[in-house]
Image (spheres, rainbow, N blue to C red):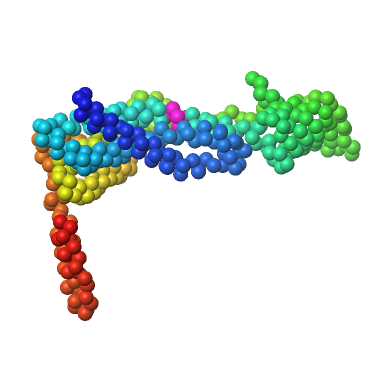
């Protein structure tokens, strides 16, 4: 890269990272509210909550990255044009195709980043997040350790803990076990500790008693103990994680197992998910091409770029929304996937043709906002005159002429 290439690439990539992190953070905050029950219902700490929900960040970047690179390219081109740098480059003999080289390099780098997230990183983190959430929901410590509350852990099994001294140590333990109809057991202990072993989890209690009362007996049997272990293994089922389409790696979608239940039940969704992963890296290239073909040609600082910028936003939004719609339709009409590839190819191909041949799209010249504003003011003035209402249209038109 030359110094100009490095300058353009550094400007785009710096703006891209800033926009990507900020947009991702905003959307991440809205998404983590779905998992707030990990704190309210499961008794987890804020650190556990943040550790699990932070796994969403790369998954969100998969959708945000193409939009972020489009905004970064528009920012860079508007900055270069506003500082007359595009005019200087053009006067020095740099063609639009030459200026586009670092822009293309930045878009390709973002495309590789999106491809890696969609193929490997996002499915792996999605599986890890689902596993962590499942572990939290089956965590016996979080489920029974709520000081001051009577917790029904299982049908006929009630726990109460007066005080929590540390992570796994407690005081004032009460257990009422009526799971067996022939016998009711009540355990009271002064101290307790949860011990995790390979064969299961146990609540080891000290300084307490066990009261057992059989259904046909009048008086209970009371046994004092120095140490007593209560088996919690049945209360800690192994976390079950369902691997859906979003959690499958791209090679699992491209070469699925013959006995895959999702493939058997919904092969159309399987096909759509695979193609969405394939054309996701093409969006940064298409968005960058649309942005440069409309904003990458030099203009004077007196010429407005508002219409061109609006055209970029409309073009990018139309392409992305059409992609979403075609993907939804492809479940019943597989040919809609070809439409997505065709739209992306047309955007990239047409933009490349304009940039290579140096043909500017003078959208701002073709759409004259000043003329449209004058015409609108004159029509409003005529309509108001019919109902005897006087509008200051003449003064507004004079100000428009002076501003030009």
Give x and y (percent) for residue 215: 83, 38
Which residue of the protein is positioned furthest toward the bottom in this rendering?
Answer: 388
Give x and y (percent) for residue 197: 66, 21
Choose between 272 and 144: the one closer to the eye.
144
Quadrant of residue 288 within the rendered picture: top left
In the drawing, does residue 103 fall left or right of residue 161? Answer: left
Q: Is residue 124 a member of the stretch shown in magenta?
A: yes
Quadrant of residue 319 within the rendered picture: top left
Choose between 69 and 127: the one closer to the eye.
69
Give x and y (percent) for residue 258: 39, 25
Q: Is residue 182 visible?
A: no
Residues shaded magenta: 123-127
Q: Quadrant of the N terminus?
A: top left
In the drawing, does residue 269 fall left or right of residue 170? Answer: left
Question: Residue at left 40%, top 27%?
Answer: 121
Q: Is residue 349 a member of the stretch shown in magenta?
A: no
Q: What is the magenta segment's predominant secondary structure?
A: helix
Which residue of the protein is positioned furthest toward the top in this rendering?
Answer: 198
Question: Residue at left 24%, top 32%?
Answer: 8
Which residue of the protein is positioned furthest toward the front in this rendering?
Answer: 402
Q: Quadrant of the C terminus?
A: bottom left
Give x and y (percent) for residue 114: 33, 31
In the drawing, does residue 397 fall left or right of residue 11? Answer: left
Choose between 272 and 38: the one closer to the eye.
38
Question: Residue at left 35%, top 34%?
Answer: 17
Which residue of the protein is positioned furthest toward the right in this rendering?
Answer: 219
């Amino acid at each position: 890269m030359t110094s100009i290439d490095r300058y353009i690439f550094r400007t785009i990539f710096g703006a891209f990272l800033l926009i990507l992190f900020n947009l991702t953070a905003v959307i991440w905050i809205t998404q983590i509210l779905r998992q707030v029950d990990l704190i309210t219902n499961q008794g987890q700490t804020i650190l556990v909550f943040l550790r699990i929900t932070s796994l969403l960040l790369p998954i969100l970047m998969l959708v945000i990255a193409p939009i972020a690179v489009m905004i970064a390219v528009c920012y860079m081109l508007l900055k270069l044009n506003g500082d007359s740098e595009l005019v200087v480059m053009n006067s020095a003999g740099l063609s639009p195709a030459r200026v586009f080289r670092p822009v293309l390099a930045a878009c390709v780098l973002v495309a590789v980043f999106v491809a890696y997230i969609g193929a490997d990183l996002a499915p792996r983190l999605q599986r890890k997040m689902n596993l962590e959430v499942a572990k939290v929901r089956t965590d016996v410590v979080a489920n029974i350790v709520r000081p001051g509350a009577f917790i029904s852990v299982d049908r006929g099994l009630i726990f109460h803990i007066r005080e929590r001294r540390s992570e796994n140590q407690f005081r004032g333990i009460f257990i009422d076990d009526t799971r067996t109809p022939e016998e009711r057991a009540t355990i009271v202990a002064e101290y307790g500790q949860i011990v995790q072993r390979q064969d299961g989890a146990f609540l080891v209690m000290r300084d307490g008693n066990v009261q057992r009362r059989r259904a046909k007996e009048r008086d209970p049997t009371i046994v004092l103990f120095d140490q007593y272990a209560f088996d919690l293994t049945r209360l800690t089922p192994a976390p079950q994680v369902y691997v859906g389409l979003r959690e499958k790696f791209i090679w699992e979608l491209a070469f699925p197992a013959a006995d895959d239940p999702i493939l058997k039940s919904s092969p159309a969704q399987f096909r759509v998910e695979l193609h969405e992963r394939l054309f996701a890296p093409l969006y940064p290239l298409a968005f960058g091409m649309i942005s440069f073909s409309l904003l990458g040609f030099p203009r004077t600082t007196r010429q407005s770029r508002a219409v061109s910028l609006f055209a970029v936003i409309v073009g990018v939004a139309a392409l992305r929304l059409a992609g979403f719609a075609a993907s939804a339709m492809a479940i019943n009409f597989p040919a809609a996937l070809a439409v997505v590839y065709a739209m992306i190819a047309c955007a990239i191909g047409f933009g490349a043709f304009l940039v290579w041949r140096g043909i500017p799209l003078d959208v701002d010249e073709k759409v004259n906002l000043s003329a449209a504003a004058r015409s609108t003011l004159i029509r409003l003035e005529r309509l108001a005159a019919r109902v005897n209402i006087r509008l200051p249209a003449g003064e507004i038109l004079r100000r428009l002429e002076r501003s030009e």
